[in-house]
Amino acid sequence: MKTIADLRAALIAAQKLTGQSSFDRRAPASKAIPPLLAAKAEISRFIAEHGDSAEAWRLLSQAQECLLGYATARESFEKALSLSPQRSPKDLKHLVLLREYESKWKDLPLTPDELQRLGRHLSDVLATQACDHTARLTKAWLAEFSPGKQDQKLKALRHWGGYCDCEVLGNAVQGTA
C-alpha cells in the first residue's frame, strides 16, 4: 500500500501534466486525465483502508479540483478541515474559493469537456482568421455539438465576458477554468 508521501508525489506528477495553475483552473490536458484518475483512485483506496486522514482528504480534494469536480472537491476539503486540529486562514480562503468555483460551474450550462472543445475549435479557427466581433462561430459550434438551451448557454458565456468569439475564447473558456 502506498504512503501519503507516495500519493502526494503521484498527485503532484499528475498535476504538472494538467496545464493548470493554482488559481486558474481549466479542463486538464487529456494526457493528465489517466494519471489524475489513478491518483484519485489510490487516494480513495487509502482513505477506505486507513480511516480518516486529514491529509488524504486534502489530496483527494486536490485531485477532484484538478478534474473540475468542485462540489466533491469542496466536500472532501470540508472533511479534511473537520479532521484537522486547527484551521488556518489559508484553509478558509481555499474553502471560499472552492465554493465560488462550484457556484460558477453550476451556473454555466456547459460541461468542462464541452467548454474545452469549444475553446479548441475557437482557437483553431481564430488562428487562421480574425474575429469578426460576433459570436457566429460560438453559435454554430453550440448548434452542432451542444444543442439545446442555446440562448441560456450564450447568456452564461456573456456573463463570463464572452460577447464575441475572441472574448468567448479569452474570457469565458480560459477565464472559467
Image (cartoon, grey):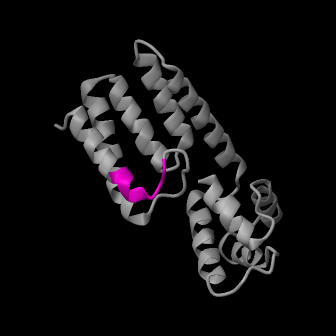
Is any atom of residue 36 visible in this view?
no
Is any atom of residue 67 visible in this view?
yes
Examine the structure image and report whether residue 76 is included in the region drawn in magenta. Answer: no
Compared with residue 149, is residue 177 higher up or lower down, i.e. above or below?
above
Q: In screen coordinates, is 86 left or right of 122?
A: left
Task: Find residue 160 and report its image quarter.
Answer: bottom right
Outermost residue on the left side: it is 1
Compared with residue 80, is residue 142 higher up or lower down, i.e. above or below?
below
Q: In screen coordinates, is 22 left or right of 105?
A: left
Q: Position of residue 8 (x, y in %)?
A: 29, 39
Outermost residue on the bottom side: it is 128
Q: In screen coordinates, is 6 left or right of 58?
A: left
Q: Position of residue 150 (x, y in %)?
A: 78, 66
Q: Look at 23% across and 35% down and name the residue there.
A: 5
Q: Position of residue 56 (x, y in %)?
A: 33, 31
Q: Look at 65% across and 48% down and name the residue there.
A: 105
Task: Find residue 94 and report its image quarter.
Answer: top right
Examine the structure image and report whether residue 18 is included in the region drawn in magenta. Answer: yes
Q: Position of residue 168 (x, y in %)?
A: 71, 66
User: Split into 4 quadrants, where in the image is the C terminus?
Assistant: bottom right
Q: Which residues are magenta?
A: 14-21
Task: Find residue 125 and report its image quarter.
Answer: bottom right
The one of 45 and 59 positioned closer to us in this rendering: 59
User: Split into 4 quadrants, where in the image is the N terminus?
Assistant: top left
